[in-house]
Image (cartoon, rainbow, N blue to C red):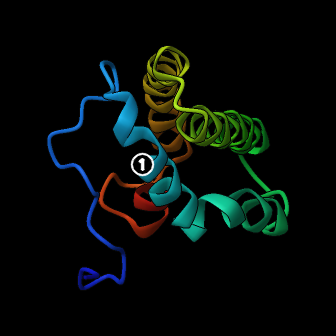
Amino acid sequence: MATQDGISPFPYPSFDPLSPIPSELPTIGRYYDSLDVDHDLIRVLKGLGEPTNGVASWNAVLTLATQYYALVSQQIAHAEATDATGFATNAKQLLSVGAKLDAAVAAVGFQSDSPCAQLL
């Protein structure tokens, strides 16, 4: 069953990515892999081109978004391999890079509730 935004609900609502249950990881990997935005976001962002102002800030967003989604791909691989240790380590990295990405998005000037900030 999909939600109003067309995304299926997360398969394990009480899942803790820092202490994953190995048997749940393949399903979680398939779920993460099904999120199309993760696959296309970097290409779309780069396709926008460079802004006339704030190039360094925008490039920081692109760099962090690229790192973040590379980590997402790695996490999917850890999940598919039922690698709980790698998945948990990767989750910590995602939290760190995600916080930096949020800060970079705010520095560019996106309001936290804007569509662009929500997407990133």
Front-most of 38 and 20?
Answer: 20
Q: In the figure, is residue 11 to the left or right of 104?
A: left
Query: Circle 1: is it few (<14), some (14-19), or many (20+) Cα within 10 Å?
Result: some
Whether 33 is drawn above or below 90: the answer is below
Q: Residue at x 51, y 57 (%)?
A: 30
x and y percentages locating residue 86 in the rendered image: 55, 18
Front-most of 10 and 101?
Answer: 10
Please tell me how many numbered marks the rendered image carries: 1
Q: In the figure, is residue 73 to the left or right of 115?
A: right
Q: Secondary structure at mark 1?
A: helix
x and y percentages locating residue 17 in the rendered image: 34, 28
Q: Which residue is mark 1?
A: 28
Front-most of 106 and 80?
Answer: 80
Q: Residue at x 49, y 54 (%)?
A: 32
Q: Residue at x 70, y 38 (%)?
A: 70
Q: Amino acid at mark 1?
A: Ile
Whether 51 is drawn above or below 76: the answer is below
The picture quadrant where one finds residue 40 is bottom right
Give the residue furthest to the left: 14
Locate the N terminus and report the quarter of the image it occupies. bottom left
x and y percentages locating residue 63 in the rendered image: 74, 35
